[in-house]
Image (tube, rainbow, N blue to C red):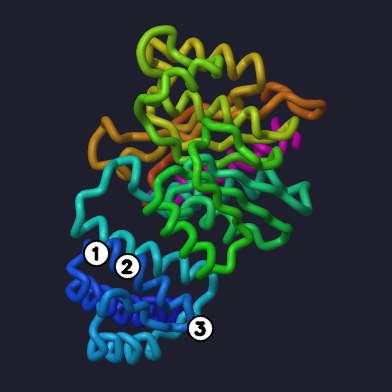
Amino acid sequence: MMQNIEKIQANYEKIEKAILMLQSELESEYLDALIETMDNLLDDKKVHVENGKPTEKVAKELEQLYVEVSLEELTAEQKRQLLQLLILKSYSVEKIQANHQMTPDTIGILVSYLIQKFAQNKNKIEILDLGVGTANLLSTVMNRIHDKEVHGYGVDNDDTLLALASISTELQQSNIELYHQDALDDLMIPDVDFVVSDLPVGYYPLDERAQQFETHNEKGHSFAHYLLIERAMQKLKEDGLGVFVVPKGMFEKENAMNLLKYIQKQGHLQSLLNLPTDLFSNKNSMKSILVIQKKGPKAKQAKEVLVGEIPSFKQRKEFSDFLTEIDRWVNSSIKL
């Protein structure tokens, strides 16, 4: 384990040094220099020169640094962790929108645990993330499924985030197809077994498009996360499952009845679990995991909707007991 951490750290230090050199030379933002550095490393460690920048001297120094980077020694999961550290560093030096922040690993690991349990009777699965961002959540889930053939699809309309997602998938050689578009526009993606998504929170600005969805608001802008849940249900196969990271207390909002009616019409609300409070800096940012199953020949409403608080990951016995309860619930209640 320690050796693995040391491998990641050694590569991180060399890549960050290259990023800072390139950032200074190009007078760019850290994140832009990060993207160009990773593109260079993935392009046989060649330094891209445009309009005489970087200079020949700096280009040679970068090439020497690139030679010292040994990405080939890392597993796909280690590469994901390495890129995550670099992106987190960019967050520390630049202001990042809340919806641009990566899903923390602790949440990703829990979502992947649920997907593994739900997929235990399948040999091949397809997973879609409608707000893929940097692909950290989707990669976390896929990297933990070792006994199946897994194909991923990711959608995002943000150029920068999708550039990072593209780097991530190429770096890890992930079986993921990325689509640069609004997830609420027409999607040329086949129906899938699972949708996983850390849903962006806020209002969707295109009212005319929102009107095409049953979960739209009658007045004013509609909630983007409501619309995306509806789109997810449209893209799921019969009996398919959506696992969403949503704002805590989402169903307590005055406009939530529309969404609940839609879920009951198209599927079954199987679980709503509040994530540990110690994962969040303030109560307004707290989130839950929502599990919805689309109706189909095998799907049925669970005898008991799994509702409650997920123990802190630091409380090892309580968290272990919680995972045991998840196992029991999945085996007795969910059919795929």
| In this view, 26 is above or below 136 | below
Please indicate, yes or no, whether residue 321 appears anywhere in the rendered image. Answer: no
Query: Which residue is denoted by mark 2 in the rendering?
Result: 34
Where residue 56 sits, quadrant-wise, is: bottom left
Give the residue at mark 3. 73
Q: Determine whether label 2 and label 1 are within 8 Å by CB.
A: yes
Which badge, 1 or 3, is on the more N-terminal residue? 1
Q: For the residue marked with disc 3, what is the amino acid? A: Glu
Figure check: 186 above or below 311: above
* Magenta residue check for 198: no
- Range shown magenta: 315-336
The disc at residue 30 is 1
Q: Residue at x 73, y 58 (%)?
A: 149
Q: Are marks 3 and 2 in contact (CB under 8 Å)?
A: no
Q: Residues within 10 Å of mark 2 (few under 14, many from 20)?
A: many
| Front residue of this view, candidates 198 and 303 | 198
Q: Position of residue 216 (x, y in %)?
A: 47, 15
Q: Give the amino acid at mark 1.
A: Tyr
Q: CA distance from mark 1 to mark 3?
A: 26 Å
Main SS class of the magenta portion in the image? helix
Q: Quadrant of the C terminus?
A: top right
